[in-house]
Image (cartoon, grey):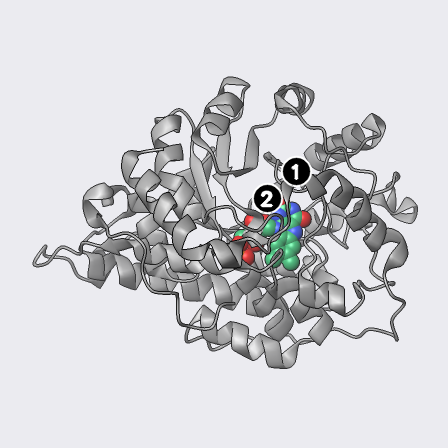
Amino acid sequence: MTSSTHVLAKKSISRRKIIGAAGIGLSTLPLMSTQVFAAVSDNARPQAPYRASTAEQKLDIISLDRLAVKARGAIPKEGYAFVSGGAGAEWTLRENRRAFNDYRIAAKRLVGLSNGDIDIRTSLLGLDMPSPIMVAPMGAHRMVHEKGEVDTARGAGLANILYCSSGASNATLEEIAQATTGPKWFQLYWNNDDRVTRSLLTRAKKAGYSAIVLTADALGPGRPEDFIAMGNPFRPDATFGNHDPEKGGFGDFGDQKTALTVKDIQFTKQFTGLPVIVKGILRPDDADRFIRAGADAIQVSNHGGRQIDGVPAGITALPPIVAAVNNRVPVILDGGVRRGIDIIRAVAMGADAVAIGRPFMYGLGLGGAQGVQSVAEHINNDLKSALLLSGASKLSDLNPDFIEIVGQNEEYSTFDG
Ligand SMILES: Cc1cc2nc3c(=O)[nH]c(=O)nc-3n(C[C@H](O)[C@H](O)[C@H](O)COP(=O)(O)O)c2cc1C
């Protein structure tokens, strides 16, 4: 941690300790894993037939905040509660948005740029990407749209952006791979039964996924309080596709291994021969340890504030992690990225790419594959405009000189989606 982030962290604790104290305690985590998965497999309250959206349309998006408001009114309340909420008192969820304000953009003027000069293309682990955005791995897309991940992946392909398929998908990883024409990664939830884990990795490689994301921070699917209060209404008719025996799968999704170590990074690499991205990193010493163990990229993330409340925002954790990584591997950031200016901040402070979660779910619910495509196009256009207004023509022009660190600011006042 740099001294400036230390100061920020201290201020943050003193101003906000009362709210943060209501979060989930570390000591409850081992228990939680069993409880949470049990809730998914056994205790989900049987629902009346659940119909999610079947919409298929392009969306006219003004901002992703406004899109979240629209989604709240349009997708089933169970789906919205599942997607929108965070762990505990949701301090970290809010912090994921607010903390961007700690880093102000030191925009440059009279630098001779016009629209035609702006280029947001980049590359990541051998992939040429039209922009630095990707779809973050998210489970259970049929909570918001009948076609689930198949449409999200198709929409990502329409925009040619990287789709990361969650191990907790309702569709199978093969169905998802077929649906997208764009690049794709597979996110693994490690199973206690090694045969299940190996089978998932073998299938992912065969289906054409070009990298494996090892999620290090999840001991169960996020269950926001509003969702718990509704009785955990997961759809009884939407199972975890990758484990469906009728579709070539086996094993119990809920039987997940929580006792992961760096050896699992090494195993994943050796077993698949694919690059491994370790996701859910918030500490520089963890990043260093995982790179030494063979990680090919680090994803700075707090799981969208869905796992443990009270941890810092991704953007707060980013600068010391970038320093520790020291250009050895790419760094991806996620958590609260909603605007082009958020991406400017992340890239200027050393991120190579950003993953975006909830807005793609809202795009899916409101417009199916075309809605997902609209979200990608919106954020790419917003990034182009932000780059021009910051006085940079391409992402590689951005560096910490574009950022002013100002410390804790007022709460983020716009609706948090
Ligand atoms: C509904 C939902 C389901 C998620 N499921 C997973 C998952 O299965 N695996 C995973 O690694 N992360 C999962 N995440 C976390 C996302 O990958 C990502 O870290 C987070 O959504 C980024 O924050 P944002 O939603 O503010 O953009 C999930 C997030 C949401 C909102």
Q: Residue at x 72, y 57 (%)?
A: 140
Q: Are marks 1 and 2 in contact (CB under 8 Å)?
A: yes
Q: Residue at x 73, y 51 (%)?
A: 169
**Residue that sits furthest to the left in the current view:** 110
The dot on residue 208 is: 1
Real-space Cα distance between discs 1 and 2?
8 Å
Res 232 visible = yes
Q: Amino acid at mark 2?
A: Lys
Above or below, comparing residue 137 to residue 190 in the picture: below
Question: Under tag 2, what secondary structure?
Answer: strand
Question: In this view of the protein, which residue sits in the foreground, 172 or 243?
Answer: 243
Question: In this view of the protein, which residue sits in the foreground, 188 or 175?
Answer: 188
Q: Which part of the image, by quadrant, shows the N terminus? A: top left
Q: Quadrant of residue 339?
A: bottom left
Pick whichever of labels 1 and 2 is earlier in the sequence.
Answer: 2
Residue 81: give x, y in percent of width and height.
67, 68
Q: Quadrant of residue 47?
A: bottom right
